[in-house]
Amino acid sequence: AKDRAKFSVQAENAVNAKADAKGDITLDPARDAATDKTAELMVHGTSNTGKNRNGNLQALLDALKQPICWASLLAIFLVLVGIHVPSQVAPTFDLIAKANSGVAVLSAGLALSTVKFSLGWETIWNTFFRLILTPAVFLGVALLCGMGGDMNKISMLVMAVALPPAFSGIIISSRYNIYVKEGASTTAVATVAFAATCLLWIWLVPFCVG
C-alpha cells in the first residue's frame, strides 16, 4: 500500500511538472506507457504477497471449517468406527435428513441464479468425467476384482459414482467466490444429462457383467 501511494505521488508530480504556463498538460506517450507498465508490475507484485500467496490452500482450509463439509466427514467417520446414534434422538436426525435434499436444491438454485450459465469445454469435460469416465473406471476395476458375480453390488457401485455433482459444492464455492461459474454450470448440465446417462448405465452394467 505504501509503494502504491508513493508511486501515485511520483506519477502526479511528473504530470504536474509537464504543465505549461497556461495550465495545459503535455502528454508523452512513451513515458506514459513506461509509467503504466511500472504501475502494473507494482500492483502485480503486491497482489501476490501475504495471504494471497497460498490462496488455494487457504480456500481448502476455509471449506473444511464449514459444517456442510466437516459434518459429512464426521458422519463417515462415525459409520466406519461403528458408532450408532441413540434411538431417542434418531427421529430428529431423520427429520433433518428428509429436509436436507430440499434445502440443498433451494440453496443451489439461489446460487445458480447469481451466475451466468456457460457451456464451455471445461463444463463438457467435467460432465463427461463425472457421468461417463468415472463410472466406467469403477466398473472396470470391479470386474477385475471379481465382483461380476454379484449384479446388485456392482450395479449399486456404478450408480453411486455416476451421480451428478453434489449441490454442496456450489454453496461452498459461492461462499468464497472460487470456481463459481464453472462449478454451477457443471452441476446444472450434469443434473440434466444424468437423466440419459442413468438409463445408459442401467442397460450397460448387466450387459458388461453378463
Image (tube, rainbow, N blue to C red):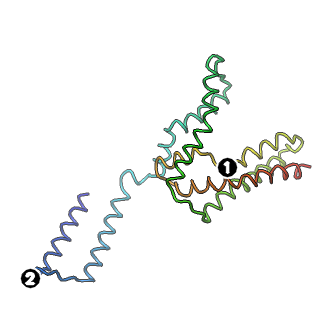
Residue 173: mark: none
Return the residue nearer the eye: 55 or 125: 125
Callout 2 amino acid: Lys
Q: Position of residue 194 (x, y in %)?
A: 72, 52
Q: Residue at x 64, y 56 (%)?
A: 189
Q: In this picture, is 176 found above or below 25? A: above
**Label 1 residue SS:** loop
Q: In this picture, is 107 found above or below 183? A: above
Q: Residue furthest top?
A: 88
- Position of 115 with respect to 92 (left or right) is left
Q: Residue at x 87, y 40 (%)?
A: 150
> Would you identify the image quadrant in which residue 39 lies?
bottom left
Which numbered disc, 1 or 2, marks the residue that appears first in the sequence? 2
Q: Which residue is mark 2?
A: 22
Q: Position of residue 87 (x, y in %)?
A: 66, 17
- Position of 150 with respect to 53 (left or right) is right
Callout 1 amino acid: Pro
Residue 164: mark: 1
- Is disc 1 surrounded by few (<14), some (14 to 19) or many (20+) residues within 10 Å? some
Q: Position of residue 94 (x, y in %)?
A: 64, 27
Q: Residue at x 63, y 31 (%)?
A: 97
- Position of 168 with respect to 131 (left or right) is left
- Position of 62 with respect to 17 (left or right) is right
**Label 2 residue SS:** loop
> Would you identify the image quadrant in which residue 35 lies?
bottom left
Q: Are marks 1 and 2 in contact (CB under 8 Å)?
A: no
Q: Residue furthest right?
A: 210
- Is disc 2 surrounded by few (<14), some (14 to 19) or many (20+) residues within 10 Å? few
